[in-house]
Image (tube, rainbow, N blue to C red):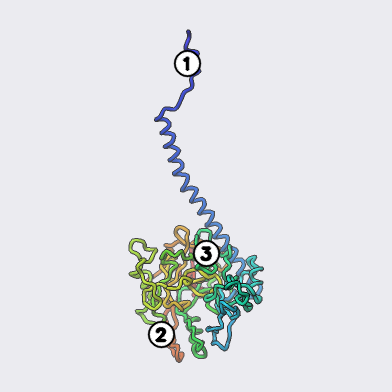
Amino acid sequence: MDTRRTNSHAHAAFTLVELLVVIAIIGVLVGLLLPAVQAAREAARRMSCSNNFKQIGLSIHNYHSAYNQLPVHGGGTTDPSMGILGYGNGAGSTTNGGGHNALRLSFLVGITPFLEQQALWEQISNPYNESVFTINDDASTMGPWNAMGPNPGYQTAYVPWATEIAGFRCPSDPGTGLPAAGRTNYAACYGDGYFGVERSSPAFNGADVQVAALRQRGSMRGVFMPRVKMGFRDITDGLANTIAAGEIITDLGDYDNRSDLLILGIGSTGGPSSSGPAFNQTLCTQHAAIDAGRPRFWDPATPRDNNSSGGLATNTLNRRGFVWADCGTMFTAFFTVTPPNSPSCNSNIHSSYAGPIAASSRHQGGVHVLMADGAVKFVTDSIESGDQTGTIPYYAVHANNGSYVGENAVGDQSPFGLWGALGTRASREVIEGF
């Protein structure tokens, strides 16, 4: 019998060694492919984030075309009987609505109708009769809220302030839900100096107002200034050379030192102190509370105490990016003093602008910034940022009588290199290669 014919039709099989080699090769390929897939997904999220910022830039330009000014960062309504900023009981009640917003609305509120959020703008700009929650379904908790809404920093029952807008969120940021009252990842640029003033007392009138104006005009050199009308005519360094807004992360409750602000406790309304943290950003960026093993986090043992120098904020709402409608720096602003993704601190829990509060992002290696001409650029963490031990530009006067105390670098080029120069609107810096 001829067996050659039968053998010629026999099916060859993989040996065990060959099978293991094939499995190993597949494993290697999968190991190489997964990081590539993750990188591609992050690239798509980063592109989407950039597109969101471009839309915000276009909305700012459309706003300027309509009103011949930029949206005010710190606009809204107030009650003159409660002082110049109208603080106090007029800020709106959780149970009966009403109130005003004490001039605390961010620039993002003003651009909502230019960002395809006309329905939301209609709710904000008209009296509103709905709350986020009610007590035992009692109709008395439904408002009505006054036009332009209550103070967003104190009020979370107002539906528009609790609404999260996709165009204000970076897809790379996973933060969501409570305790935030409508998150945002995009913030106004205040420039390279943070010696402003924030007084919540109803007695904030007369000479104090003049003091605030003098300080702010000399010390805060960015495209946006709190409660001041600004326009493209004010940006004499050139729209393409000046940052209008930047990216920030929202807090995840994990002691991230970019979003969980350390309170340095020297929120003085008098002249500057050369040893105070309001004028020495290294007291924040080199603070002992930074976790030695994880430099982007505070040590979890850091106390939560608003009244101690070096304590973290106790109120869970007072975190980075938690209230898109509020002009407070912790929510919707930053300074071009410390480089992107640096630790952020505030002088006082009640102070809107009094400490090194940096831009930040969940992207690897840097942040997006929106230039005043509408262009979006990616700035790396290693951007040239000058002398980080230098004193911020400031103009200082006493709060009580308005007398002159001193100044530093007002009108000069920024001491914080290219990063600081990009944040100033009218310091006559020549910017090359950006």
Q: Residue at x 47, y 12 (%)?
A: 4
Q: List the single residue furthest toward the top.
A: 1
User: How far is disc 3 from disc 2 in space, using C-alphas?
Assistant: 40 Å
Q: Picture coordinates of residue 105 (x, y %)?
A: 56, 75
- Seen from the viewer's position, the closer of residues 83 and 307 is 307
Q: Which residue is mark 2?
A: 271
Q: Secondary structure at mark 1?
A: helix
- Seen from the viewer's position, the closer of residues 89 and 408 is 89
- Seen from the viewer's position, the closer of residues 232 and 153 is 153
Q: Picture coordinates of residue 264 (x, y %)?
A: 39, 76
Tag 1 near tag 3, CB within 8 Å: no
Q: Residue at x 40, y 74 (%)?
A: 263
Q: Which residue is mark 3?
A: 177
Query: Who comes first in sequence, dot 3 or dot 2?
Result: 3
Query: Who comes first in sequence, dot 1 or dot 2?
Result: 1
Q: Nearer the viewer, mark 1 or mark 2?
A: 1
**Residue type beneath disc 2:** Gly
Instruction: Tell me the tag on residue 7.
Output: 1
Res. 162 visible in picture: yes
Q: Residue at x 51, y 50 (%)?
A: 40
Dot 1, how many residues are within 10 Å of its Cα: few (below 14), some (14-19), or many (20+)?
few
**Residue type beneath disc 3:** Gly
Q: Secondary structure at mark 2?
A: loop
